[in-house]
Amino acid sequence: MEPSVFQGSYPVVRKTACAKQTFDFVIHCPDIAKMAQAGQFVHVKAVGFTLRRPISICQINPEKGNIRIVMEVRGDGTAQIAQTPEGGMLDVMGPLGHGFQLLEPTESAVVVGGGIGVPPMLETASHYGENATAILGFRSASAAILEEDFQRAGCQVVLCTDDGTKGRKGFVTQALKEHLEQSKPSIIYACGPLPMLKGVAALAKEYGVRCQVSMEERMGCGVGACLVCACKTKRPDGQEGFSHVCKNGPVFEAEEVVF
């Protein structure tokens, strides 16, 4: 039986800086690219560090055998990964976790991303193309990334910044509410900070739209063996418990998550 998770040292075929302390890598890993799905992540090893760093998959190109990741430097480990040059090698394990459930491309979808939660929405939005609306939120113009990528995928893009330096001023939840008042999509997908996800989930419930959220939690092992990334969820019988974001998620139905 073919394995579903791979680990190895893979070459970086392209590296660019797309914003301050934010780096865009294309990695040639045919085995991972063949199995990867929108919403999954990879675990990347930083030289000199024991624990791997979870990074969402931004795009998948199984024909070329490549995946794309966009990562923000948040500490010493990610800083070490960011130093990897084009042509260098990265120790990558994946694909990991459960991704988004994609409907038929003819269905309408809204993807909502906040900050570094924007990259994992690109593969999902690309599936729907012109039938997708991408609502992207950033702190300011200097932090905005991937807008043109979503446009190239055919999506309608609504860009929001907290300070109004690019796009419209305000939060993504305000833009989402306005969109839902005009039309009802088949599904909403979201990834970003917890308060944003809570707001998106509340709007989805209010307007009666199915919603899937990708949870961001610190991870240890990445395969469900430790308890670092536990989040509170609700089972079908209404009882609350804990799920592993790495193994049971990172994608959950919004109604399952106890915010």
Image (cartoon, rainbow, N blue to C red):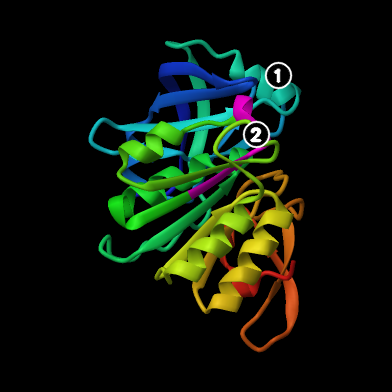
Residue 157, by quadrant, is top left
Residue 123, by quadrant, is top left
Can residue 239 be seen here?
A: yes
Residue 87, by quadrant, is top left
73 and 199: which one is in front? Answer: 199
* Position above or below: 42 against 252: above
How many C-alpha atoms fall within 10 Å of the one at disc 1: few (<14), some, or many (≥20)? few
Specify start and end residues of the magenta stretch as a single range. Answer: 135-143
Quadrant in which the N terminus is drawn: bottom left
Which residue, given by chain and number where applicable, does mark 1 sit on?
A: 48
Rendered location of residue 132, percent (x, y): 37, 55
How many C-alpha atoms fall within 10 Å of the one at disc 2: few (<14), some, or many (≥20)? many
207 and 197: which one is in front? Answer: 207
Q: Amino acid at mark 2?
A: Arg
Regarding mark 2 in the picture, which secondary structure is present there? loop
Residue at 27 percent across and 60 percent down: it is: 105
**Left or right: 179 in relation to 131:** right
* Position above or below: 214 against 8: below
**Left or right: 237 in relation to 146:** right
Q: Which mark is residue 52?
A: 2
Residue at 45 percent across and 49 percent down: it is: 134
Residue farthest left in this picture: 63
Rendered location of residue 192, percent (x, y): 63, 49
Q: Does the magenta run of residues contain 167? A: no
Q: Amino acid at mark 1?
A: Gly
Rendered location of residue 197, percent (x, y): 65, 58
Quadrant in which the C terminus is drawn: bottom right
Residue at 35 percent across and 64 percent down: it is: 108
- The reply to whether discs 2 and 1 touch (Cβ–Cβ < 8 Å) is no
Q: CA distance from mark 2 to mark 1?
A: 10 Å
Rendered location of residue 201, percent (x, y): 62, 67
